[in-house]
Amino acid sequence: MKIFINENEIEIFVGATVESAIRKFDKKILFEIQKGYSDACDQYGNHVSLSGPLHENSQIIIKKISK
């Protein structure tokens, strides 16, 4: 299925989680999210859990967290 991360199209398996999609896109970004340096949000700006499910055309936006 097709999803988008920061406007980049990613092809991922049906049933994928946010974590598996970000891992495929960029492992460094996944590490930053796990350490609290970045956050994953949907297209409306809502936080999404790494264990959250994805569906066709899901959009994930990665945002840096300023401390």
Image: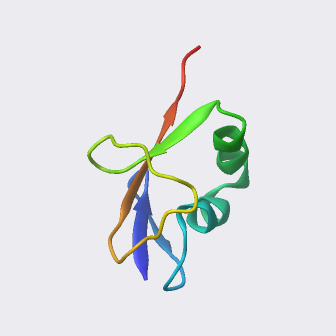
| Applied colour scheme | rainbow
Residue drawn where x is 30% and y is 50% of the image: 43
- Residue 32 in the figure: left or right of residue 50: right
Q: Residue 56: x, y in percent?
A: 35, 77
Quadrant position of residue 66: top right
Residue drawn where x is 47% and y is 70% of the image: 53
- Count of all numbered marks drawn on residues in the image: 0
Q: Quadrant of the C terminus?
A: top right
Q: Quadrant of the N terminus?
A: bottom left
Q: Is residue 30 above or below residue 64?
A: below
Q: Is residue 56 above or below residue 14?
A: above
Q: Is residue 59 above or below residue 36?
A: below
Q: Residue 44: x, y in percent?
A: 26, 45
Q: Residue 32: x, y in percent?
A: 68, 39
Residue drawn where x is 69% and y is 43% of the image: 34
Q: Nearer the viewer, residue 24 or 34?
A: 34
Q: Nearer the viewer, residue 13 or 49?
A: 49
- Residue 57 in the figure: left or right of residue 15: left
Q: Is residue 49 above or below residue 1?
A: above
Q: Residue 51: x, y in percent?
A: 57, 62
Residue drawn where x is 34% and y is 43% of the image: 46
Quadrant position of residue 45: top left
Quadrant position of residue 37: top right
Q: Residue furthest left?
A: 44
